[in-house]
Image (spheres, grey):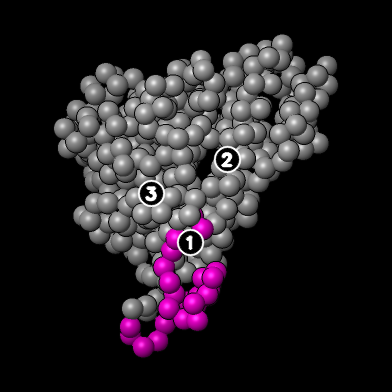
């Protein structure tokens, strides 16, 4: 087996025509001849190239590319049925909360939320569950759960274990190797990496789950288009190099913010004081490119929401540009106030997604943003 950085460059299916270095875009809705391909909602060679690459990177047998990260979450939640119980990380992307609370709960599915970093609490809450969907690190509080321990608990209780691996990508973490049944990605983020497409992915080794996902994708019609599949695959070719730069810049930003008098908490798995250090060392080879922090004074909030000369105030993460996000009013606005307060999503909290710019320039821009406040 090749290393991940090699697989990201060469992975994917040979399209079988002219030996192209970059797989062609099969921009067609239908195929003639009645052979392997018939209709692009069901299957398409460009999407297959991406899916094969994703499966290789995540050490999986089956991969599915969807029209967004939420479409991928939708597909996984569609594995459960009326009367089932689903357990979710309590600190999670606001869109995941919305689709659970506002859509699937109407169909008789019970959702509970727990701190998946707390193994004993999670073990108790797993009783009677059909699915556990965990983020690690979580969004935005960067909690790191012990994935191997959670996988063991789920196996013992007959619970499907799904992990959202968006923040670390298969370059830094492979949940299937740790015992997870399903890996989920918002491929809009690091996998694509260029702020130019919206996509999602699901990878599994379980044939029964794969058969269900095949039916769900073909029936709901939420598979990724050929052109967007090509864009994500193009992004993956540089994923390993980009993740190293994202991480390098995250370290620089985290250390700067930790020493700044106007900044309170700085949450980054690479910092020595991060609560998930033991788990991180056991299950991942990197820390990622997202840093979360609190400012000490509310007067700073308005200024930071204007962004800087380099740093853009915008939602999303994982692209080439450094973005600063205000979870309370953007990504996590849909969470109930009680839930936000318990997690720690306050008005003072910001999430920083480090891009590919020069790290010294990013730090200088952060300094100007903080010191230039009234």
Q: Nearer the viewer, residue 281 or 343?
A: 281
Q: Residue at x 74, y 19 (%)?
A: 300
Label 3 close to label 2 by CB (< 8 Å)? no
Residue for badge 2: 244
Q: Main secondary structure of the magenta part?
A: loop
Per the image, the residue denoted by label 1 is 10
Q: Residue at x 43, y 72 (%)?
A: 14
User: Which residue position is annotated with label 3?
Assistant: 58
Which is nearer the N-term, disc 3 or disc 1?
A: 1
In the rendered structure, the answer to whether residue 56 lies left or right of residue 181 reads: right
The residues bearing labels 3 and 2 have C-alpha atoms spaced at a distance of: 18 Å
Viewer-proximal residue, 205 or 325? 205
The magenta segment is 8-35
Q: Which quadrant of the figure contains the N terminus?
A: bottom left
Alpha carbons under labels 2 and 1: distance apart:
19 Å
Eye-nearest disc, 3 or 2: 2
Vertically, is 354 above or below 37?
A: above
On the rendered structure, is 148 left or right of 308?
A: left
Query: Residue 270, percent across and down?
Result: 53, 25
Is residue 167 in sight in this rendering? yes
Q: Which mark is residue 189?
A: none
């Amino acid at each position: 087996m090749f290393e991940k950085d090699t697989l990201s460059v060469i992975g994917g299916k040979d399209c079988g025509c002219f030996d192209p270095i970059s797989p062609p875009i099969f921009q067609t809705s239908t195929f003639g001849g009645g052979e392997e391909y018939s209709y692009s909602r069901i299957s398409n060679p460009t999407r297959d190239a991406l899916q094969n690459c994703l499966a290789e990177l995540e050490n999986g047998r089956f991969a599915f590319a969807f029209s967004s990260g939420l479409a991928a979450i939708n597909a996984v939640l569609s594995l459960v049925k009326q009367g089932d119980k689903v357990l979710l990380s309590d600190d999670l992307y606001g869109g995941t909360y919305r689709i659970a609370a506002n859509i699937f709960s109407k169909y008789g599915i019970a959702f509970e939320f727990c701190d998946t970093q707390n193994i004993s609490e999670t073990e108790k809450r797993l009783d009677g569950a059909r699915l556990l969907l965990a983020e690690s690190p979580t969004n935005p509080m960067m909690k790191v759960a012990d994935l191997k321990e959670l996988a063991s608990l789920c196996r013992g209780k007959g619970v499907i274990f799904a992990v959202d691996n968006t923040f670390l990508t298969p370059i830094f973490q492979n949940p299937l190797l740790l015992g997870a049944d399903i890996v989920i990605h918002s491929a809009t983020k690091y996998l694509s990496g260029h702020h130019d497409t919206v996509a999602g992915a699901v990878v599994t080794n379980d044939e029964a789950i794969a058969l269900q996902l095949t039916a769900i994708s073909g029936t709901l019609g939420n598979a990724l288009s050929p052109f967007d599949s090509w864009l994500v695959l193009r992004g993956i070719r540089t994923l390993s190099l980009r993740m190293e730069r994202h991480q390098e810049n995250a370290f620089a930003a985290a250390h700067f913010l930790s020493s700044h008098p106007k900044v309170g908490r700085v949450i980054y798995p690479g910092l020595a004081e991060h609560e998930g250090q033991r788990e991180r060392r056991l299950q991942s080879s990197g820390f990622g490119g997202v840093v979360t922090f609190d400012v000490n004074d509310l007067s700073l909030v308005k200024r930071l929401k204007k962004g800087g000369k380099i740093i853009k105030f915008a939602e999303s993460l994982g692209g080439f540009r450094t973005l600063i996000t205000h979870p309370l009013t953007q990504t996590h606005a849909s969470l109930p106030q009680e839930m936000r307060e318990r997690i720690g999503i306050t008005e003072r909290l910001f999430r920083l997604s480090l891009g590919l710019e020069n790290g010294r320039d990013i730090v200088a821009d952060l300094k100007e943003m903080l010191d230039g406040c009234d």
